[in-house]
Image (cartoon, helix red, strand yellow):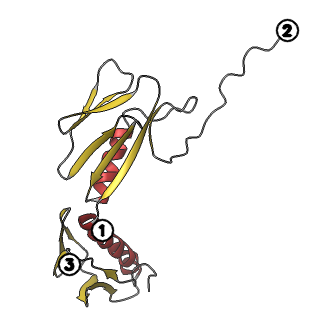
Amino acid sequence: MSRVGRLPIVVPAGVQIEIAGSNVRVKGPKGEMQREFSALIGITREDGQIIITRNSDRPAERALHGTTRAVLANMIHGVSAGFERILEIEGVGYRAEMKGQNLVLYMGYSHPIEVEPPQGIAFDVDQKARQVFVRGCDKEQVGQVAANIRKVRPPEPYHGKGLHYLGEKIRRKAGKAGKAAK
């Protein structure tokens, strides 16, 4: 058995789950998500917990067991508490601001870059700490939107200027050593 797959998922209060075969709909205070899982994996609800089972030890089913449990746990966590990615801005003159629901980035280009949030995603900016917050209930979507924003100006290795995740370690290069004395 998969170590991750055999762990039951505890359903918090305020979260409603509808299981129809391999189709699962999760509804909570932060939003609603629906996903179709593989028919090889069994999903059942028992005593306020979700149990994930598999029929055999074939490699295809073994691979799906832990993954299904992790994705379903992320769905439940997303609709109850939500997910957040924080991006930090480094560099002189680089900044971000909100324009309605849209995020406007000033990253050293000749023009500002305006990012419109997709359905289910919200942006927030902390001007003082120079941070951009990406929030939503779908973990995959939050991560992808944060990665797309980071691509606007990835951190460069010499001075570390650009957009990077909070706590991300940027590998730095030495740069020019200078002229040698004659």
Which one is closest to the eye, mark 3 or mark 2?
Answer: 2
As measured in the structure, the alpha-carbon distance from the residue carrying label 3 to the one carrying label 2 is 75 Å
**Residue 83 x/y as whole percent:** 32, 58
Q: Which badge, 1 or 3, comes first in the chain's sequence?
A: 3
The answer to whether residue 146 is left or right of residue 167 is left
- Where does label 3 land, which residue? 22
- Where does label 2 land, which residue? 182
The answer to whether residue 33 is left or right of residue 159 is left
Q: Which badge, 3 or 2, comes first in the chain's sequence?
A: 3
The crowding category of the residue bearing disc 1, from other C-alpha atoms within 10 Å (few below 14, some 14 to 19, many at least 20), is many
Residue shown at 36% from the left, 79% from the top: 65
User: Looking at the figure, which quarter contains the N terminus?
Assistant: bottom left
Q: What residue type is labelled 3?
A: Ser
Nearest to the observer: residue 111 or residue 29 = 29
As measured in the structure, the alpha-carbon distance from the residue carrying label 1 to the one carrying label 2 is 65 Å
**Residue 109 x/y as whole percent:** 36, 21
Q: Quadrant of residue 117?
A: top left
- Where does label 1 land, which residue? 77
Image: 16 above or below 97: below
User: Looking at the figure, which quarter contains the C terminus?
Assistant: top right
Q: Which amino acid does label 1 sit on?
A: His
Instruction: Say which element carries label 3.
Output: loop
Q: Which badge, 1 or 2, comes first in the chain's sequence?
A: 1
The answer to whether residue 176 is left or right of residue 171 is right
Residue shown at 28% from the left, 85% from the top: 49
**Residue 173 x/y as whole percent:** 63, 33
CB within 8 Å, label 3 to label 2:
no
**Residue 62 x/y as whole percent:** 40, 80
As measured in the structure, the alpha-carbon distance from the residue carrying label 1 to the one carrying label 3 is 19 Å
